[in-house]
């Protein structure tokens, strides 16, 4: 069976998903919608699909599934609309910036029986997945400590920052999900520290650009997250998991993986420049997993609940910074 897709939003991540859908033999990109006609037309021209309105995609008999890549404040409404229209839904993170809104939205997903997958692409990165596979195979014993370093090469435009919900809900949310993915136990408390070290304009927009987070589970396992909106040396994405019998780590990836040595020392080519190139395989694999869930009835993961918990961890981090204390997840998820 070929899954016929409608793409909603043809911006930065929309273009990445258009490429992933078009590259999958079990998928067909039928139509794209965007509030800005040139954005939709560019994707339609590149991948040979139609430009349609969101309403037309909603009513279309020739579309089985949608990928929501519009700005965050449109996600929950679109999920509900397409759940009611009987389409399978892949939605970019976050589901919404309000936990209550996410809860209401997930109720609609539940009552309609719609399939909803949330775009935590890093779970599908082959290197990070191999770390998880090493854990599952018992190669490092019982997981004790996780370290996640995640630094963007540069900050997004201030207009994006203003509507993003802030660094914890927009950027750290990926790392909250990765921490859950690797710890194998739900997080109980969140302690966060945040500052503006990169760009004062980010501070004026009410956000931070440099944050550190310590997550702890009930049994005492810990995860440490380091985030910056600046990395002069490329897109810095590393994880390390320490266990009772060893350690598993995924280092930074490069488009070209060589090392050149001389009297002056060792040099290596630059890192990937950003998510579009670093996570190409992950985006393709998450779309493949979504297709498998539709065609083979495979379990959806990550799902709406994973999206909700990651948002709760972000809310707890915001509260922790404001109140200068560790915040129990139960305080925000109650
Ligand atoms: N998983 C990831 O790695 C990842 C990476 C980037 C962005 N995202 C998420 O994807 C979403 C989009 O981010 P982006 O960086 O691609 O933004 P973007 O601004 O580059 O693209 C958004 C697109 O949606 C269009 N749009 C806006 N309102 C619309 C509407 N009501 N109907 C139809 N189209 C509309 C815009 O014209 C634009 O082309 C955000 O929620 C963001 O958090 C996820």
Image (cartoon, rainbow, N blue to C red):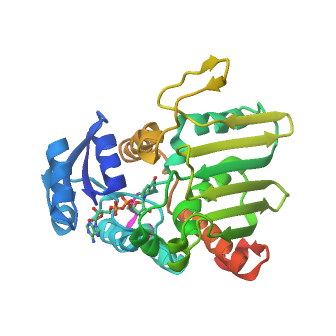
Rendering coords of residue 334 (x, y %): 67, 79
Residue 170 falls inside the magenta stretch: no
Q: In this view of the protein, can residue 62 be seen by the observer?
A: no
Indicate the quadrant containing the N terminus: top left, top right, bottom left or bottom right: top left
Q: Is 10 on the left or on the right of 243, as rendered?
A: left
Residue 112 falls inside the magenta stretch: yes
Rendering coords of residue 209 (x, y %): 58, 65
Q: Is 266 on the left or on the right of 295, as rendered?
A: right
Q: Is 172 on the left or on the right of 106, as rendered?
A: right
Between 287 and 234, the one lying in front of the other is 234
Query: As displayed, is residue 30 above or below residue 327?
Result: above
State which quadrant residue 9 falls in: bottom left
Q: Is 117 on the left or on the right of 22, as rendered?
A: right
Query: As displayed, is residue 138 above or below residue 302?
Result: above
Q: Which residues are magenta?
A: 110-115
At 76% across and 33% down in the image, what residue appears? 138
State which quadrant residue 84 falls in: bottom left
């Amino acid at each position: 069976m070929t899954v016929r897709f409608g793409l909603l939003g043809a911006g930065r991540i929309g273009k990445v998903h258009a490429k992933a859908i078009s590259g999958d033999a079990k998928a067909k990109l039928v139509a794209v919608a965007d509030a800005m006609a040139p954005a939709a037309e560019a994707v339609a021209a590149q991948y040979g699909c139609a430009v349609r309105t969101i309403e037309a995609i909603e009513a279309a008999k020739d579309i089985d599934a949608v990928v929501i890549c519009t700005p965050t404040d449109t996600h929950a409404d679109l999920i509900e609309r397409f759940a009611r229209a009987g389409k399978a839904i892949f939605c970019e993170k976050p589901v919404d910036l309000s936990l209550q809104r996410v809860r209401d939205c997930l109720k609609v997903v539940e009552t309609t029986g719609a399939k909803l997958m949330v775009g935590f692409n890093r779970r599908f990165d082959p290197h990070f997945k191999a770390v998880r596979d090493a854990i599952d195979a018992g190669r490092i014993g019982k997981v004790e400590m996780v370290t996640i370093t995640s630094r963007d090469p540069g900050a997004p435009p201030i207009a994006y920052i203003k509507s993003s919900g802030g660094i914890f809900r927009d950027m750290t949310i990926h790392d909250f999900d990765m921490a859950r993915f690797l710890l194998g136990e739900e997080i109980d408390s969140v302690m966060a520290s945040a500052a503006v070290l990169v760009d004062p304009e980010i501070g004026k927009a009410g956000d931070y650009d440099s944050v550190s987070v310590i997550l702890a589970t009930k049994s005492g396992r810990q995860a440490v997250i380091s985030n910056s909106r600046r990395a002069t040396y490329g897109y810095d994405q590393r994880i390390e998991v320490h266990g009772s019998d060893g350690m598993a780590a995924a280092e930074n990836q490069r488009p070209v993986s060589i090392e050149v040595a001389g009297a002056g020392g060792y040099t290596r080519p630059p890192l990937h420049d950003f998510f579009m190139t670093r996570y190409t395989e992950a985006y393709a694999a998450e779309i493949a997993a979504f297709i498998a869930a539709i065609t083979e009835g495979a379990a959806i993961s990550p799902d709406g609940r994973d999206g909700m918990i990651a948002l709760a961890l972000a809310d707890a981090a915001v509260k922790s910074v404001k109140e200068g204390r560790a915040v129990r997840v139960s305080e925000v998820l109650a």
